[in-house]
Amino acid sequence: MNQKEIEEFCKKARLLSKRDTEGTTVIVFKSVLCKKEEPITSTELSKLSGLHRLTVRHHLERLKEQGLLEEKKGKYKMKFNSIEDYVDFRRKKMIRMFEELENMAERMDKEFIITEKRRKIEIKDG
């Protein structure tokens, strides 16, 4: 898989931040993929990627927040056995979120309709 495809995956998975104008998230992500079997520190990833350690740490934390990585004792590794597992995890999470949104929207619609009926009654009576 080439760099552009990995970058496209990162965009679609919303792993990139707007501040990342140099594509460093993709570099860190690819470096983690290369070391997926063994946990790695930000210092080791910095040496592997050629990026500053603080830049690497920032992106590792962001990837961790996105649910892709886990950290134990300062070492990071993939949280899932495969990228496909991660995508499946994200899909299920999105489905749950949309189900919650639908329930909330339904309750809001019911409340809004009742409120509108009350307003109409108040206007007629007033």
Image (cartoon, rainbow, N blue to C red):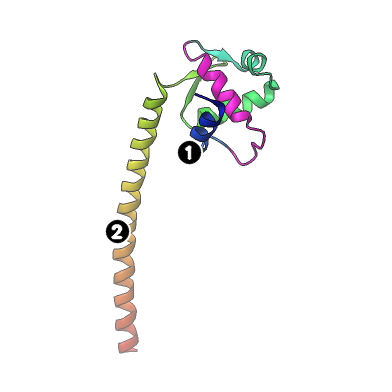
Question: Badge 1 local density, few (<14 within 10 Å), some, or many (20+)?
Answer: few
Q: Position of residue 83 (x, y in %)?
A: 42, 25
96 is higher (above) or lower (below) than 7: below
Residue 122, located in which quarter of the rendered image? bottom left
Can you tell which mark lies on residue 106?
2
Looking at the image, do the residues carrying marks 1 and 2 touch, with CB atoms under 8 Å apart?
A: no
Please indicate whether residue 120 sits to the left or right of residue 13 in the image: left
Ranked by sequence position, the earlier of labels 1 and 2 is 1
Q: Is residue 49 above or below residue 112?
A: above
- Specify the amino acid type for callout 2: Glu
- x, y (%) of residue 27? 60, 25
> Which span of residues is magenta-colored?
17-37
The quadrant the C terminus occupies is bottom left
Q: Picture quarter containing residue 54?
A: top right
Q: Nearer the viewer, mark 1 or mark 2?
A: 1
Q: CA distance from mark 1 to mark 2?
A: 29 Å
Q: What residue would you read off at disc 1?
A: 12
Indicate the secondary structure of the residue bearing disc 2.
helix
Q: Secondary structure at mark 1?
A: helix
Give residue 79's quadrant in the image: top left
